[in-house]
Structures are given as C-alpha cells and as structure tokens.
Image (tube, rainbow, N blue to C red):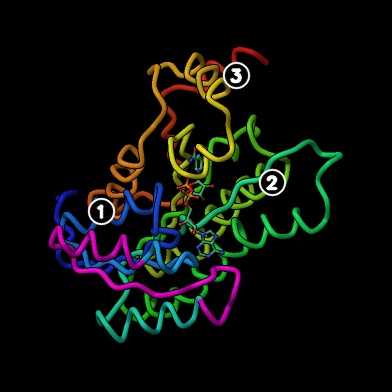
C-alpha cells in the first residue's frame, strides 16, 4: 500500500520548511519514522515539534549536506535511533539569480556544492547501510530546470539540477543489483519560502499563465509523488524521472 509506511525509516534533507517539510509530513503522517536533516536548526526543531504534535515519530539531525562528515553522522544517527535506513529523500537545495555575466565562481561553487555534491554526500553515507539491509529507495529532488532551464534562476541552478538527474540515472544503474532504487522528482513552480523570496508577485502571476493546471504546485503535490517512489508500489521503478509540474513544460516547449 502506498499509504502505509509504518515499517519504514526515511531521511528527508532540507525538511525544516518548504517541499521537504511537506514530504516529511506526508511520509510521517503515513507511519514512517522520519529524520529531518537541515542547516536551519531553529526552524528544524519547530517543524519537528509540530510534526510530533500530529503524532509523527521524528528526529532532527543538524546537517550541512555539503559536508561529508555531517552526512556520515546523519546516517549513523539514523541507524542508532531507528535501526536502519529504508529511504533517503535528497531535497535540500538553494536557488540562484542573475545572468551568466553576473555569475561569479563563488556562487557557481556554492550552488553546485549544495544541490549536487549534497546529493552525492548523503547518498554515499546511506548506501552501505542499504546494501547491508538488502535494498532501499533514494529519491532526488531535481527540478524542471533539470529538463530545460530555470527561467527565474541562474545557470548554476540549471546545471546543478541537470547534474542531479545524471547522478540519479547512473546510481540507479550501479545500485540496481542491491535492490536500491534511485529516482528523481522534478517539481515545477512551487510556492515555498525559496520561490517567495526569489520572485516578484508579477513574475509569479506570469508563470501561472503558463501552467496548464492554472496554479502553482504545493509541497503536498510533490510529497505524493515521493510517497509513490518510496513505497513498495514502485518496486520495479528505478532511474525514472517524474515530472510534477502541472503541465507547465507543455507551454515552455511550445515557445521554443
Ligand atoms: P526552501 O528554501 O523552502 O527549503 C529548502 C530547505 O533546504 C531549507 O529548509 C534549507 O534550510 C535547507 N538547506 C539549504 N541548504 C542546506 C544545506 N547545505 N544542508 C542542509 N539543508 C539545507 O526550498 P524549497 O522550495 O522547498 O526547495 C526544496 C527543493 O526543491 C530544492 O532542492 C529545490 O531546488 C527544489 N525545487 C523547488 C522548486 C520550487 O518552485 N520551490 C522547484 C523545483 C525544484
């Protein structure tokens, strides 16, 4: 059943707020033991206590996904507390604005470090445990920018999200023999603190015009997709990239 996760332990990175929080709520609400990993410590603790009030079993681990040591500690703490790791959702990410001429090397590196190397670090940290327990599911949150370009963001963001898709597919190939499935979700335009800070109201209204379903996504839309990919219902699905964009790609591709 897609909606019963009571036998699963799931790590969600970047779950203090936004899409990651929505994923933690959905999986935790369906019985999963959830580990929230984030750099935003105060917000992470607030989110965890709100989830606990709703009956979710949740732990927090302060973790900067750009750090190999933090990622390894995240995996260790999860195994110590819950006895295993059934799924990792690599959701932590940051945005970026500006034209290519404005993009400097520091901003390039920072976005690649969080959005792409962060996925590598956390995946490397959990895979040995998943191999030991004969399987697992890793779901990477890419973006529709990873299928085309980010119209609100910069080239480093686009490159990082294409990188996440490449990493997803190669990991799926390498880890299939261990029954570790690796998939990606590409959210379209989603109302979260990231996009509220990075776009004007006018830009958001112009984007809505291009979405077939005539609305921005909510974190819950992506949480439902992630729930399917974590669940046993997708037991033969790996290397797959699931676009959850309300049909916005149709409009963008028509314009080219
Ligand atoms: P958000 O800013 O609301 O949340 C991101 C979370 O990641 C925050 O809690 C933040 O503290 C955490 N984080 C940032 N850097 C971190 C690090 N180094 N280590 C650990 N945690 C870190 O953003 P969101 O909109 O919820 O985005 C979540 C994911 O979805 C990102 O990967 C983003 O690129 C992707 N995405 C978002 C949209 C959108 O429209 N919002 C669209 C496509 C893809």
Q: Which residue corresponds to the image point at 44% horizontal and 51% vertical from the top-left?
A: 183
Q: Badges 3 and 1: C-beta atoms under 8 Å apart?
A: no
Query: Residue at horizontal 51%, vertical 16%?
Result: 210
- Structural distance between the alpha carbons of marks 2 and 1: 29 Å
Identify the image quadrant of residue 41: bottom left
Front one among 124 and 203: 203
State the quadrant of the C terminus: top right
Q: Classify mark 2: residues with Cα within 10 Å, few (<14), some (14-19) or many (20+).
A: many
Left or right of 243 in this view: 147: right
Whether 46 is drawn above or below 225: the answer is below
What residue is shown with label 2? Answer: 159
The residue located at (70%, 59%) in the rendering is: 110
Q: Nearer the viewer, mark 2 or mark 1?
A: 1
* Residue at 28% from the left image edge and 42% from the top image edge: 224
Question: Magenta stretch containing residue 124, yes or no?
Answer: no
**What range is drawn magenta here?**
45-70
Q: Tell me the SS state at disc 1.
A: helix
Q: In screen coordinates, is 79 left or right of 206?
A: left
Indicate if the residue with disc 2 has its beta carbon within 8 Å of ligand 1. no
Q: Which residue is mark 1?
A: 25
Name the residue at the bottom extreme. Answer: 80
Q: Position of residue 193 (x, y in %)?
A: 47, 44
- Mark 3 lies on residue: 253
């Amino acid at each position: 059943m897609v909606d019963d996760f009571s036998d699963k332990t799931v790590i969600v990175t970047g779950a203090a707020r936004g899409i990651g929080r929505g994923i933690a709520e959905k999986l935790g609400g369906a019985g999963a033991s959830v580990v929230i990993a984030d750099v935003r410590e105060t917000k992470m603790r607030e989110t965890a206590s709100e989830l606990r009030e709703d009956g979710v079993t949740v732990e927090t681990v302060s973790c900067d996904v750009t750090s190999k040591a933090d990622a390894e500690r995240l995996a260790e703490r999860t195994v110590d507390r819950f006895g295993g790791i059934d799924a990792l959702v690599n959701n932590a990410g940051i945005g970026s604005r500006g034209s290519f001429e404005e993009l400097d090397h520091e901003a390039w590196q920072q976005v690649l470090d969080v959005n792409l190397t962060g996925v590598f670090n956390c995946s490397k940290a959990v895979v040995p445990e998943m191999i030991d327990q004969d399987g697992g599911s890793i779901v990477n949150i890419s973006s529709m920018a990873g299928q085309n370009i980010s119209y609100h963001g910069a080239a480093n963001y686009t490159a990082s999200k294409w990188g996440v898709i490449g990493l997803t597919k190669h990991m799926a190939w390498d880890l299939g023999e261990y029954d570790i499935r690796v998939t990606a979700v590409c959210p379209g335009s989603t109302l979260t603190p990231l996009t509220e800070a990075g776009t004007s109201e006018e830009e958001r209204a112009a984007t809505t015009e291009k979405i077939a379903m005539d609305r921005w996504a909510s974190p819950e839309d992506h949480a439902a997709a992630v729930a399917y990919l974590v669940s046993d219902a997708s037991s033969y699905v790996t290397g797959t990239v699931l676009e959850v964009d309300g049909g916005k790609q149709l409009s963008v591709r028509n314009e080219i």
